[in-house]
Structure formats: C-alpha cells, structure tokens
Amino acid sequence: MLRPPPQLTVSEWAERHRMLGSRASAEPGPWRTSRTPYLKDVMDALSAVHPARRVVFMKGAQVGATESGNNWLGYIMHHVPAPALAVQPTVELAKRFSRQRIDPLLEETPALRERVAPARARDSGNTMLSKEFPGGILVLTGANSAVGLRSMTARFLFLDEVDAYPGDVAGEGDPIALAEARARTFGWRRKAFLVSTPTIAGRSRIEREYLASDQRRFFVPCIACGEMQWLRFERLIWEKGAPETARYHCSACDHPMQEHDKTAMLGSGEWRATAEGQDPHTIGFHISALYSPVGWLSWEQIARDWEAAQGKPEDIKTFKNTVLGETWQEQGEAPDWERLVERREDFAMGVVPPGALVLTAGVDVQDDRLECDVWGWAEGFSSWLVDHIVISGSPRDREPWDELARVLARDWPRQGGGAMRIARLCADTGGRDTAAVYGHLRRLRDPRIAPTKGIDGWNRAQPVQGPTPVDALVNGQKLRRGLKLWTVSVSTWKADLYRRLWLGRGDAEELPPGWVHLPQAIEVEWVKQLVAEQLRTTKDRRGFARQEWAKLRERNEALDCAVLARAALWLLGADRYGDRFWQQLRDQIADAPLRVSEL
C-alpha cells in the first residue's frame, strides 16, 4: 500500500539524514540541532508545512546560518522536490559555493547522494551551477547576473548574503525583486530565505527586511535567577586588557555567567517576537555571535577583537557587522572645511613626502578641463595630497589627453631622494562626452589608466567591479569592445574618505593610521570641494529609510578625484593583499631608491 512521505520539518530531516564531512565542517559527523538550538525554529520556518512565505535571518558570523540554508536545500531535494534557486552575490561566489558547500552536501549525505548523479557521469544533470534531481532542479547563480535571475521559475529561493548584492542588475532592477518574481507563479506554496550579515544603516537590505518583520530575538535564561533575556554586547564585561575575564552579566540580577554556561542557556532558549510585522507571511530572526556555541567563537575572543578594533573605525564597523550582526551608522556629516584648512601641513606640493609608498591619481572630466589630483599612500591608508593639476581644454579634443599622458610620464621627486611615478589612475568617463572620453583613453593605451563609471551603492565586498568591455570611437572608427570599463561604488569610497577626515589626533598628538595630510599651499576652494557632500537619510517608495549623498555646494571635483584615487589604490591590490602589498613597496623603494615607477 502506497503512503505519502512523512511530513518532516527541516530540522527533523537534518537530524535523520544530514552528515557533515571534514571538507565543509570543523565538526564532522551527523548533524545535531542541539549544538545550535537557535537554528531549529529558523529551519522549521522553512518547512513546507510552515505558513511563512519569507524568512529573514540577520545574523553575526559563526552562528551556522549557511548550514541551516544547506539543510533546507537538502530537505527540498530529498523531501519536497521542486525548482529551487540559490543566489550568491556574484556568479564567481556561486561557483565557489557550489564547490565548497553544495558538492560536500551531496557527497556526504547518503539520502542525497542517491538522488543526484555524480558530476562526472554522462548526462547526469549535475554541473557546477545546476543540480538535477527527481522532481526538481537546483540552479545556482549570482545576483550580478540578470540572465541567471530570470532564467527559470522557482518555488524556493535561497538568497544568501543579500547585503553584498548590487543595487541594480544590468538596468533591470533590484536583484531580490527579480529573484522573487520567479516564484510568484507558485502562489502560497512559495518560500524565500533571505540571509545576511548587515552592513550600512539605511542601505542594508537585510536590516530593511528584518525591520519589516516581527523582529524575533532569541531569549535565554540567566543560570542564577532564570530571567529570560536576549544577549546584548554591553552586558559582556571584562577587565580592560584582560579579555580572558569576559563574563556575561544578567540584566536582572547582574550574575556573571561564564563561557561554559552558554550550553545550558542555549538549550533553554526560545525565540520571541519583539514587534508586529508589516507582512503576516514574513517572519524575521536576529542573532549575534554572542550566541556562538562553546568551542566556536568565545566571549573571550569577542572581547579581544573589540579591544583590537579600538581606534580603527573600519575594524569597529567590521566588528559590529560580523560579530554583533548590527548595521553601521556612517559618519555622513561633512567635516568642517575650516578645521581642515587650519590643519594643513608644511610640506611642498609636487614633492612626495617620505612616508608615502605609492602614488595614485583620480581624474574628473569637466566640460572645459580635466582635474587631476595625485595622492600618496602608506599603511593604514594614510594619504598625502601630492599635487593638484588642472588641464584646460574640452575633453572632446586631443590636447588635454596628450597633456594627461605627459602627467603619467612625469617623475615626482621624493623627499630624501629618488622619484616616483603614478602607479594607477582612475578617470571618470561620465558626463556629456562619454564617447569622446572612451576614444581618447583607448588611444592613450596606458595600462595604468582605469576608465571608470560611478554607480550608487555600498558594495564593500567589491567596491570596484569589472572590467566590462565597451565600444570606443577612435579617429571616427567604432572599435567594438575596444575599452575596458570599471564601475566604482562611489558611496563606499566617500564614506571611507569622511571616516578618515573625521579622525582625531591621539593622546600623544600622534597621527592615527588613515590620516589625510593636506599641504599648506592647497587653496581653500579645493578644501571646500573635498567636503562638498553630505549623507542624508530619505525614504524609498516602500517607506524604508535609505541613505544617499547630497551636494552642499555646487563644485565637488576634489571629492570626486579623491574617490577615484582611492579606487585606484584598491585596483592595485592594497585592500586585498594588506601588509604584503605595503612590504613589497618598501622593498621596491629600498632596492631602487632612485625611482619607484608603476607596479
């Protein structure tokens, strides 16, 4: 007699079938929900029998969120077969996710291994970005691929790290909206799982979705008085300089709880809604790394990370995002230009200060001139304005670009001996003469020049993307895909600059890493342009808060050039390679003191 399959929840399926291997887990063996009890309700909300259509999970690092999503995908393939779409921020990350997460899930879980043929089998339906199984298919794609997002209808959507998604995909709109449109035909049976660590307040997608939900928090009991509470960072207390003394103090009786108490606390915890959701079919969960199980991220390590981040705004932001699972409020207020004028320093323009290890430049294209600012950089992203150059002439004409080529060929003397050249230059191609700018940059053919286009957005994971081939017009002849164009997330770099401009001197009058050095000779008008915009909070069409940059004064060329010079440093690999990048530059200067040319 035929019987329907048992109506398992996702957590029950994981307990019965999920196996963790050493490839994808630090704790191989059968899945145990008791290890991360807070994931049970999250996973069960993804079950076919649960009424929720959208499940939002805003979280810190090392809490097991991705594995809960993988359990859901395994549950779909084995228990509720249907078309499913898993979206990562980029196609490249989708391929990595397939190799590092999905392949181990299929290979190490017997119930799935027998349903998805090995990739090496002929006509298996198992490829890098597509996994066929009886009754359904799992397609993996990137949020940067409009084709991938509209390629199929899907009943289930796993949208991972949504805060790293681009703001717009090939002019077709928001990637979350594009993905969710794929599931509408399934009506009430559809389900979407939105997961991410948050980023910038007012720009964070996961915060926006969480705030529109019932805002659930995981309440755990005090081991002394039994008071139920959700864990707050300010209740984690330790002696300064001694992170090993970190204890969590009860909000009711102030009893200090130790790391080993966490197991009992988590086992007796429960999710509670703290708001009334705007959509009855959407539920939201928030959890920080304070809940990370014993043996994962400890309270001592969290205290240690917080102490190490002090005095480093970027590290504090990372801590809030990844450890606490909270958004970061950007310092969007424009610094006082008078204060910046007063703190100008006595070093000569046109001469590279001894601390600078590399030169980059940003070029802003105006109707009657090119504005070029040359910046020197050192560890910690300390910077010096080395030169400000105005090249007169229409960007449609040849002469200004020939003069820019001479700037790139120029040696800037280095204080103490030797000379340096610009290692990378980002040139804005926006404006009314884009086609002419493309053609002239193509004609120069200098590999140090990166043609750029500014875009809105706070993409911190990939603030410069590309390159994308575009057509260029050279000597009246159209060259198909003749130029490589980079897109720059200008909001990210403006916020980065303002954070550095707001830095204060240390207790011993020492300049902190990231300090922006301005020469005495730079004009007051230029300083005003450097802080010509301010971050403002507005409401979008759905009534959600969003942040955008607005002009305080008409001219902002210095700000645009500074953003492009910082993007050029990113292209050189300073952010990607860190200390290794700066050490290579120090070695280069030591080996060739007479000249440091392009990298």
Image (cartoon, grey):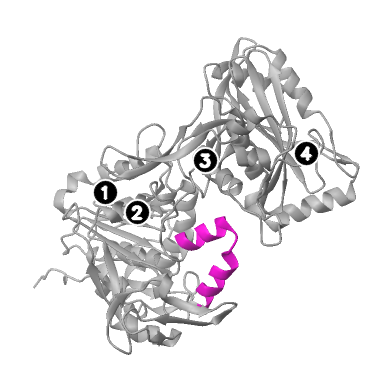
Q: Secondary structure at mark 4?
A: loop
Write down the region rendered in magenta: 300-321
Q: Secondary structure at mark 2?
A: helix
Q: Earlier in the sequence, mark 2 or mark 3?
A: 2
C-alpha distance separating marks 2 and 3 = 25 Å
**Residue identifier under label 2:** 207
Q: Amino acid at mark 3?
A: Ala
Badge 3 density bin: few <14, some 14–19, many ≥20, Cα 10 Å: some
Foreground pick, 315 / 112: 315
**Residue identifier under label 1:** 154
Give the residue drawn at x 60%, y 22%. Answer: 365
Q: Amino acid at mark 1?
A: Ala
C-alpha distance separating marks 1 and 2 = 25 Å
C-alpha distance separating marks 1 and 4 = 49 Å
**Residue identifier under label 3:** 334
Q: Quadrant of the N terminus?
A: bottom left
Residue 189 lies in what quarter of the image? bottom left
Give the residue drawn at x 72%, y 13%. Answer: 399
Looking at the image, residue 431 lies above or below residue 58: above
Rendered location of residue 451, percent (x, y): 61, 29
**Residue identifier under label 4:** 598
Dot in front, 4 or 2: 2
Name the main secondary structure of what is drawn in magenta: helix
From the viewer's perspective, is 453 left or right of 294?
A: right
Dot in front, 3 or 1: 3
Q: Earlier in the sequence, mark 1 or mark 4?
A: 1
Badge 4 density bin: few <14, some 14–19, many ≥20, Cα 10 Å: some
C-alpha distance separating marks 4 and 2 = 42 Å
The answer to whether the residues at label 2 and label 3 have Cβ atoms under 8 Å apart is no
Give the residue drawn at x 48%, y 52%. Answer: 93
